[in-house]
Amino acid sequence: MPRFPGVDYLHFDSLLSEEELLVRQTARQFADDQAIPLMRDAFNNAVFPKCLIRQMGELGFFGANLEGYGCAGLNNVEYGLIMQELERADSGLRSFVSVQGALVMYPIHRYGSEEQKQHWLPRLQTGEVIGCFGLTEPGFGSNPSAMRTTAERDGDSWILNGEKTWITSGSVADVALVWARTPEGIGGFLVERETPGYGTSDIHGKLSMRASVTSSLHLANCRVPASSQLPLAKGLKSALSCLSQARFGIGWGVLGAAMDCYETARSYSLTRKQFDEKPLAGHQLVQEKLAWMITEISKGQLLAMHVGRLKDAGKAEAAHISMLKKNNVAMALECARLSRDLLGANGIMDEYPIMRHMCNLETVKTYEGTDHIHTLVIGERVTGIPAYR
C-alpha cells in the first residue's frame, strides 16, 4: 500500500511544532500500517476491529488531551491531528476513540470524584476498559432536555429507568455514562455492564458507520450505588460540554476523510486516461473539482487549527466548535461526492475508500448535533436569539 503523502497546499505544516508533527506522524503510521488494511473488511462485515484497541491505548490515543491518570496530556491540536489520521482510516475508528476519550474519560476527569478518576481513567486510557455515553433517547435526538430516563433516590442507591439509543460502543462497553433526570435536575451515572436491570441490544441494518458498534441501552429498575453519580455534573450543561469535546474531534477527524478522498481522486485522475489518451487530470472539469477540494480542505485545516489554538488558550466557545463541525463535515462530504464522480463507476467499488467515507460522513453530519442544529447555534451566537426554542 502506498504511503499517504499528506495534503498541504498552504504550507500548513509550517504552523505545527516539532512535537505536533511527531504526534501526527505516529498516528499516520498507525493508520497506514495497522488500521487501513483492516477497514474495508471491517466495514463490509459490519464488525469493529477490536484488535486495534489495546494498540491505540499503548500509543496514548484515548483521552490524549487529558492530564494525569496515565493520559498523554497532549495539546488540542495534537489531539485533533490524531483524530484526523484515525478518520482517514475510517469514521468508525475515530468515533470509537472520540467516545472513549471525549464522552467517557473527559466527563469523569471533569466532573468525577477522585475515587472515580483513580478507578476508571487509567484503565480507560489503556483500553483495558471500554466506555459508552448514554444521552440520546428514542424520542429525543436534538432535544436532550426532554429526556425521559429517570433516576430516583432509594437510600444509598439510585434506581434508573429509561432507554438510550444510537449509542456508540454500547454493547461492548464495560461502563456506560448514563444521563438521567433526578429530582434535583439532570445528572450523570456510571453504570457497569453486569448491573442487574441494565441491558443492551445492537442496531443492525446500517448502511453507514458499519465498522462501528451502535446500540441501545435499556434500564429497568437498574440499581446503582450513590457513589456512581458524577458529583460535579450539574444539569444538562454538563452533558453538553462533553459533546463539545467530541464535536471538536469530529471537526478535525473529517479532514482526514476529505484528504483520503481527495488524494485518491487526484492520484487516479493522473493515471487514468480517456479519449485522446490524455490523463483525466488534464481536463478542465476534472481540475475544477480538484481545485475546489484542495481549496476547501485548506480552509478547513486553518479553521481547525485556529479553534484548536483557541481551545488551548481556554477561549474556544461551543459556537466556535459548532462552526468547525458544521463547515468541515459538509466540506468532507462534498469532497467524497466529487471524488466518487471523478472515479466514475470505480468510485463505488470497495477497492477504493471513497464510497465508504461518503456513507460514513452522512452519519457524521447528523450525530453530535445535526448540521441544522449547529446552524442555529451559530445563528444564536451572532444574533442573540435562540431560534430553536
Image (cartoon, rainbow, N blue to C red):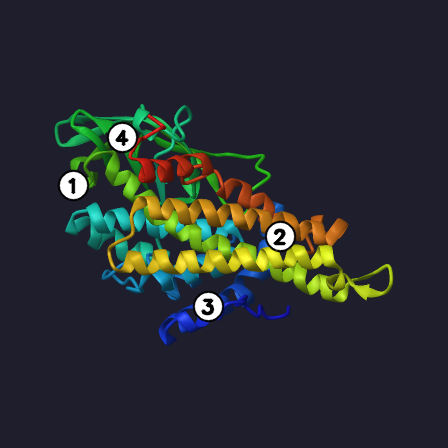
Q: Earlier in the sequence, mark 1 or mark 4?
A: 4
Residue underneath mark 2 = 41
Q: What residue does disc 3 label?
A: 12
Q: Compute the Cα span from label 2 to label 3.
A: 33 Å
The three-letter amino acid code for the residue at tag 1 is Pro
What residue lies at 13% left-to-right and 32% top-to-bottom? 156
Q: Which of the two marks, 4 or 2, is nearer to us in this view?
A: 4
Judged by depth in the image, the label closer to the viewer, 3 or 4, is: 3
Name the side, left or right, on which 194 lies relative to 112.
Answer: right
SS state under label 3: helix
Q: Quadrant of the N terminus?
A: bottom right
- The circle on residue 268 is none
Q: Residues within 10 Å of mark 3 (few under 14, many from 20)?
A: few
Identify the image quadrant of residue 147: top left
Residue at the outermost left position: 155
- Identify the amino acid type marked 3: Phe
Q: Amino acid at mark 2?
A: Asp
Label 2, secondary structure: give it.
helix
Report crowding for label 1: few under 14, some 14 to 19, many 20 or more residues within 10 A (C-alpha). Answer: some
Identify the secondary structure beneath mark 1.
loop
Camera sees residue 170: yes
Work out whether mark 1 precedes mark 3 in sequence or the reverse, and give the earlier one.
3
Q: Regarding mark 4 in the picture, which secondary structure is present there?
A: strand
* Label 4 to label 2: alpha-carbon separation: 37 Å
Image quarter where the C terminus lies is top left
Residue 128: quarter of image: bottom left
The tag on residue 231 is 1
Q: Position of residue 85 (x, y in %)?
A: 48, 61
* Crowding at mark 4 (Cα within 10 Å: few <14, some 14-19, many 20+): many
Name the residue beneath numbered marker 4.
Answer: 180
Q: Position of residue 8 (x, y in %)?
A: 52, 68
135 or 58: nearer the viewer: 135
